[in-house]
Image: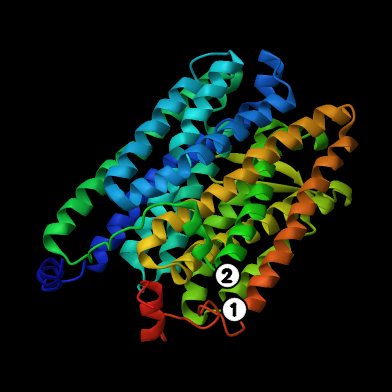
Amino acid sequence: MTQLTTSKSSLPEPTPLYRWTVLVFISLAMFGNYYVFDSIGPVFDLLSEQLGYTDQQLGLLYSLMSVAAIIFLLVGGYLIDRWGIRKSLLLFAVICLIGAAITASSPLFGIMASGRFIFGLGAEPLIVAVTTALAKWFKGKDLSFAFGINLTISRLGSASADWSTSWARPLYDNWQDPLFLATAIGGISLAGAFLYWIMERRAEERYSLGEAEETEKLEFKELYRFDRSYWYVVALCVVFYSTVFPFRAFAIYYFQQAHGLERDAAGLLNSLLPISAMIATPLFGLLVDKIGKRSFFMAVGSLILLPLFLIVTYAPPGPDINVVLPFLGSAEIPFTLLAVMLLLGMAFSLIPAVMWPSVAYIVEERRLGTGYALMTLCQQVGMALVPWLIGFTNDFVGASAEQPELYAYGMWIFTALASLGLFFSFMLWRTERGPHAHGLETITTKTGMDVPEQRRRRGEE
């Protein structure tokens, strides 16, 4: 091991151009993944009208993906640590494509649900693999900014799914054609994974990438070795994603039913969330790389999120604003809904841009794949429950276009989750200002990490 490390150290580090090219390819894998993930939301009304699906069944199409992720994520993290990133990434991309094809293949709920389940087996582990790749290639080199760029390209996939109600409008005469389109676009994910395979393989011969240390055997008793800051980040991750993604899942349908918007307008409005995040996420990532204050910014994002679901429920709609997106058309959108989605986009930008890179500063390098997998697994526990819970609540209270006020019950569930997010982010901020801090408030690209901190993160102390 020592001789191998010595020989590798004589090679140069990857050039900036090489690293950023790698970033583009793994981000393409995420683009296709995100598009397929969000492609089902724009057809919720068609599934309801043409196939008779209930809101609870619509919620299950998202929940089942998270159930699959819960089953497979710890295994996925272990595979990443054992097999390496490129093999794992390619495997997960193949699984995602198979799941997307099955989802589009049949009107039977059982088959469609099984397709979403299979997609979930690959989707979240794929994100873990990409996240681990970013930490490998960019740690100490604008890591938060690289995460921001990655999320920008990824969320372009989400926005494209929302925009498909406009640019692919002829396909929305039935529920199936938009899902076949999603399967085709899911092929981009497989292409990105294959291109990353080539780039990493070549880099091993030309550059010093560092040698992965021996990974630990995955045992549940070892999970207790993650400290308090890690678990606060995990708790924030759970409640944040259990709030934002289920809301996005139902948003187009909700705007149609509760606020009377047409599908095109509802899709455009929902796309403002990833659009604003695409612009702001890399900027927030660049900011925290320069000034630190990571736990503080997570608390600020949680505070922004807290009131938004009550505003969208109870505040007057205000005047209609003509929103125009080039090449996609325009729509009249009530001012209140527009403001809420832009603010939600700000929180959607700020928290992930800071949260995911922070794990790389808290967890030892040799356990990073498992740390990210465990964090994503916990996230999926919440996301498995909440979409189903929202659909069940809507059906139970009888929320519909005829009784739109009853959608308020679901909005209160989101508000309760946002309140928990504010609590956990505050606890993280308080911890990171004390004697057990990991440098989330102080580490910048200028200061870097001191030697004891580097040794602690490698597990040498």
Q: How many marks?
A: 2
Badge 1: residue crowd in 10 Å (few <14, some 14–19, many ≥20)? many
Q: Would you say residue 257 is visible in this rendering?
A: no
Q: Amino acid at mark 2?
A: Ser
Asked whether the beta carbons under mark 1 and mark 2 sit within 8 Å of each other, the answer is: yes
The quadrant in which the C terminus is found is bottom left
Q: Amino acid at mark 1?
A: Glu
Picture disc at residue 432? 1
Marks 1/2: CA–CA distance = 7 Å
Lateral position of residue 9 relative to residue 91, left or right: left
Dot 1: element: loop
Residue at position x 52%, y 29% in the image: 117
Which of the two labelled residues, at mark 1 and mark 2, occupies the earlier sequence position?
2
Where on the picture, by quarter, is residue 14?
bottom left
Residue at position x 66%, y 49% in the image: 244
Badge 2: residue crowd in 10 Å (few <14, some 14–19, many ≥20)? many
Foreground residue, 205 or 22?
205
Foreground residue, 39 or 272?
39
Percent position of residue 139, x then y: 36, 69
The quadrant in which the N terminus is found is bottom left
Percent position of residue 393, x then y: 81, 34
Foreground residue, 446 or 356?
356
Percent position of residue 104, x then y: 50, 20
> What residue did someone put label 2 on?
229
Lateral position of residue 4 relative to residue 171, left or right: left
- State the residue lying farthest toward the front: 221
Where on the picture, by quarter, is residue 136?
bottom left
In this view, 66 is above or below 438: above
Where on the picture, by quarter, is residue 146?
bottom left
In this view, 225 is above or below 126: below
Q: Would you say residue 307 is visible in this rendering?
A: yes
Lateral position of residue 318 relative to residue 250, left or right: right
